[in-house]
Amino acid sequence: MLLYLFLAIYFFVLMSVFIYAAHRYYMVYLYYRYQKDKPLPKGKLSSLPRVTVQLPLYNEMYVVRRLIAASCSIDYPKELLDIQVLDDSIDETSKIARECVEEFKRRGYDISYIRRDSRAGFKAGALAEGLKIAKGEYVAVFDADFVPQRDILQKTIHYFSDKSVGMVQTRWSFLNSKYSMLTMIQAIMLDGHFVIEHTARNWSGRFFNFNGTAGIWRKEAIDTAGGWQHDTLTEDLDLSYRSQLKGWRFVFLKDEVSPSEIPVEINSFKTQQHRWAKGSIQTAKKLLPEIMKSNLPLKVKIEAFFHLTNNVSYLLMLLLSILMYPSMVARINIGWFKMIVTDVPFLLVATIGISFFYTCSQREAYKDWKSRLIYLPMLMSFGIGLSVNNSKAVLEALFNRKTEFTRTPKFRIEGKNDKWADKKYRGEKNFLPIIELLLGIYFTFNIYFAYINKIYVSIPFLMIFQIGFFYVAFLSLFQVIFGRIIFKFSSFISKKEDTITA
């Protein structure tokens, strides 16, 4: 009886993983099905409107100058552009930001430095504070790790000639995707989100979201939706759904890109992933009941469910990982062939689905897409390795555990010769690499168990899990130790140089 109860749990988890993985096939189908429905501006605005550019900052000393300079270089009439530097920093960033603002003020730019008394509401609070005094009827937002293109407003503003359009989002591109295997895997993961998912959702008439940066809002669309709120860690996702529920239409421009810097240090990346995973589940809890009770078309409701709950798949993957050994024992007791003909096809479809999804995103975005496919096996392993980090985030959201908005450290890494280890910012450190390491060891045992019991067909799947957990664990631990040593050494050298100079 206990064995059959376990099998029921195992197959429930397996089917749930399969459903979320199969949804990627549907995204690819929608992407190609609605290629002819690419959004185009209805016409040109009779006159260019005033635009406010908001630059939210919190401890961004390495990238703040680049951000402000690029924002001031946007090709738009100076008299119609005002720039807000929204600085909540508690380090050297504030001094650098003030100096930059004063420098560009002297050059004739309408730029202001805005600092709050507290960091209440974090990024959402800073954006809301700036919005109170924003001069523009449209608001562009750029995070510190972005470099706004000169023509960004010229290519987006005329979509607002349609009075129903509330927000226009551009696609992210990556300045440092070729820095390491870690950055390339991240870039491919994000390409899947932007190139396939965003395009499929938007062009097929489903909801998609503003990504917190590299997009332009109609100020009225923010206000009528209730403004920026900070009761979730993904204020951008939350506002996007509230705004679309009010009837505002969003536009995604797949072919207009905004360059950005992605994390080069895995603990910084895990910090970012934790915030995104937790925030999406918080938003699902907050808004899905309202979405399901609304008069929206069924296709919109279904896609909203998959979109907002997608990170639950990490928790399901972690459960599947833990259940892997008992499932092999069950194969032996029940007959491994009967088990294999039921669960292997599901695992096979899921893994092929992920590869197919990301292959399509690379093919649609890059001329050299074939050369990028060598990263796909590692991408699948990496996604499994992240399941511990992201499952923690999902559980915190489900059980209402409050945590602060933790920024993603940025180092201004653009080329292979740039260094990060001697810089002061770090991602969050915790006990999770130990769990990841133990899971890697657990799957090493599983591979041995499968081998001695001649369940050979399971070994390739088990290796995907093993490699993923070991990679994430070892890289997390190595970069913490290596980064700490390099930072202490560089600080020691710097102090020596200061002493000699004095």
Image (tube, helix red, strand yellow):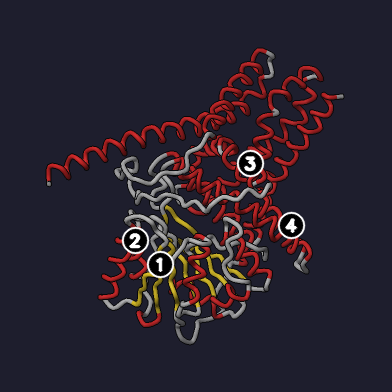
* Alpha carbon separation for disc pair 1 and 2: 9 Å
Q: Which residue is mark 3?
A: 314
Please tell me whether mark 2 sits on a helix, a strand or a loop.
helix
Please report whichever mark, 1 or 4, sits nearer to the chain's N-terminal start: 1
Please report whichever mark, 1 or 2, sits nearer to the chain's N-terminal start: 2
Q: Residue furthest left?
A: 501
- Residue at 66% x, 59% y: name it: 33
Check contact, mark 2 vs mark 4: CB within 8 A.
no
Q: Which residue is mark 1?
A: 115
* Alpha carbon separation for disc pair 3 and 1: 38 Å
Mark 3 residue type: Tyr
Mark 1 residue type: Arg
Relative depth, front residue between 298 and 98: 98
Please report whichever mark, 3 or 1, sits nearer to the chain's N-terminal start: 1
Mark 4 residue type: Ile
Relative depth, front residue between 54 and 340: 54
Q: Which residue is mark 2?
A: 94
Give percent across and percent down for residue 265: 42, 42
Label 3, residues with CA under 10 Å away: few <14, some 14-19, many ≥20:
many
